[in-house]
Each structure stands twice: as structure tokens, then as C-alpha cells.
Image (cartoon, grey):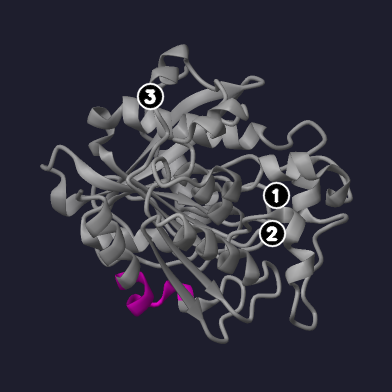
Amino acid sequence: MVGEFRCASPIESLVSFLLMGGACFLQGCKPATPLTTPGRLTTPGVTPDSPYSTADYTYAEVDGNPLQIRAYRPDAIKDVKKTPCVISLQGSGFAGTDLSRGAGSAMWFIDHNYTVVAVPYRGYSEDIIFPAPLHEVVAAVRYLKKNADVIGINPDRIASYGASSGGWYSLMLAVSGAESFSEAGLLGSVGDPSLQSFSSTLCCAYDEYGPTDFAKMDEQLLLAGAHTHNEDSPEARYMGFSPLQNNLTAVKRASPLSYLSKADTVPIFAAHGDADLNVPVGQSQALVEQLEALNITHEYHEIKGAPHAGDEFAQESHLQLALAFLSKECAR
């Protein structure tokens, strides 16, 4: 049923334990780093020190298949009616994620009294291409806002946290309040009609090494061994055509840079390693250049020697920088 609240059964809890390192609903738990799916990029994982409770929610159905999110709520503040929230969008090279992947490094925020919500997205296939999975992510945010009281989160303090392709989704949510975003048909109408009255606007967005302009990725390659993107790439498969240069209008539609504006873009925290062979650091540099030109609130950290999905992004010192930014911008 669309909009269904569901707590996992004991059998499902055991399955979740085996897949993720545990899901303890009353006593809390410490999940292990998410499993690696062959052929997909992974996101560094963090094990929180604090116990938490877990609940799954079905926010929509597509082709008869339920689309679900998973909320991890700190037990330490179980009596607090509304906590700030971080939604986790993990990296996958646009091949898709699922709940077995958990919430990656975003789990760290549980120790700082944030509810963390894992938002999986479907991967590309012959039948699933841009912008369908983006429409579903937008619907998930709308669902969170509509059901904030039930989930126990503050609808005005929801931030996105994504890495790699998840970083792209995080950036697209950051610009989703722009009229041009809606005019481009990127909000979609997934889920119950009642969701359509809720916006997907966040309080801020965190992007780790996400692509920002598929058409420019190959010309920004500077490192030996770097992956190419114009043909037969994750980006091309996600767009549904190859080479990407054959339809620059469609590629521009998929770029968060196309929708940046001072009035409608939420504050952005971005980080990228200069040794990234998957997504060239020039992608984040181009983002920052435009953020600066438009005077949009942002913070950028370029990590020397860090590869794609490097452990540097899960280190305490780095996550503290992100926490400070989120706490400041989401408290406005």
C-alpha cells in the first residue's frame, strides 16, 4: 500500500542482520560496512557508536514494485518528537542501490542526534533511464515531508548526503526548487497524488565526488588510467543513448549546473579527491566556479591524493566539517 508504515518482522530482521550487520529495533545496533555489489562503486561505511531503531516505509509503487526507504532513528532521543534528518544516497555508477546497502557514511550522523534515512534508487536498464529514478527520489523526499510527524523528523531540517552517482542525486535535489527544474519535467508525479503538494526542497545538500556535467567529463580527464564517459559508460546507459555528445540538449537537462540560482539553490557542501579516476575533479571544480559566480552559499574541500570513494571521506575530521555545515545551514 502506498504510504505504508512497516516495521520489519523477526525473519526480516535476521535477513537484515546477515546482509548489513544487523538491524535491531529495540536495543539498537551497529551495522557493518555495506556489502559490495559486483560491478558497482561502493561508498565508505561508518559504524555509529549509538544504538538506534529502524523502520521501513513504502513511499510509492512502480510497475507493481514497492519503493521503500529505511529510517534509522537514534534511541538516545526517542522522546524527541522531531529530529533533523540526513537522507543517504549511495554511489553505484547509476546502476542502482537497495536497502541492503544501508546508509554508508551517513550512519555517522546518528551519533549526533540525526535521523538517517536510506533512499535507494533504481538503476538503469532498457526500461529505466533518466529521469525516472530521479522522479522516484523526489517522491521519497516528498513522502518524508508529508509523514514527518510519523517518522519523527523536522520537515524543515532535511539534508541530502550523496556520493558519486548519489552525489549527483543530492545536487539535483539541491536545485529542485528552481522553476526551470520543474519546467524541465524533473519533479515527476511518482506516488500518491497527495505527495504532489509537498516540495523536494532541502535545507542543504552534501555532495561527494558527484558528476555535474556528463558532457564535459572526458575533456576533464587529466590522470592516467581515468575512466572515459562519452560512450558505453554508466552515464550513457543512464541517459539511454551513446555517445553522449550526440544529444547535448538531453545531457544539459541532466546537469545540476543548469538549474543553479541564488534564489532557489540550497547551501551545498562538496568534497572531491584530486586522484579520482572515476569522476574527474574538474566536475566539482566547475560546480564551485558557478556557485561562487552566483554567490550561492557553499563549502568545498578538495582532498589531495584521495581516490574515488576513498577512506578519507569517512574520516572523523572530514565528517565533522560536514556536520558543522549542516548544523549551521539547517538551523536557519
Residue at 24%, 47% in the rendered image: 84
Task: Classify 304 as above or below 237.
Answer: below
Give residue 172's position: percent from left, percent from top: 53, 44
Q: Is residue 53 left or right of residue 172?
A: left
Quarter where residue 11 is shown: top left
Measured as percent of width and height from the top left, residue 79 is found at 10, 42
* Element on which disc 3 rests: loop
- Report helix, strand or loop for mark 2: loop
* Residue at the spot of label 2: 40
Q: Residue at x 54, y 56 (%)?
A: 167
What residue occupies the far top of the structure in this picture? Answer: 193
Say left or right for 260 vs 81: right
Q: Please report the bounds of the magenta region as a residue range.
A: 313-320
Q: Front-most of 310 and 29?
A: 310
Amino acid type, mark 1? Ala
Q: Amino acid at mark 3?
A: Phe
Q: Which residue is mark 1?
A: 95
Q: Residue furthest front?
A: 293
In space, the residues marked 3 and 2 are separated at their CA atoms by 32 Å
Visible in this render: residue 100?
yes
Label 3: which residue? Answer: 198
**Tag 1 secondary structure:** loop
Categorize mark 1 by other alpha carbons within 10 Å: few (<14), some (14-19), many (20+).
Answer: many
Q: Earlier in the sequence, mark 1 or mark 3?
A: 1
Residue 315 in the magenta stretch? The answer is: yes
Can residue 39 be seen from the camera position used here?
A: no
Q: Earlier in the sequence, mark 3 or mark 2?
A: 2
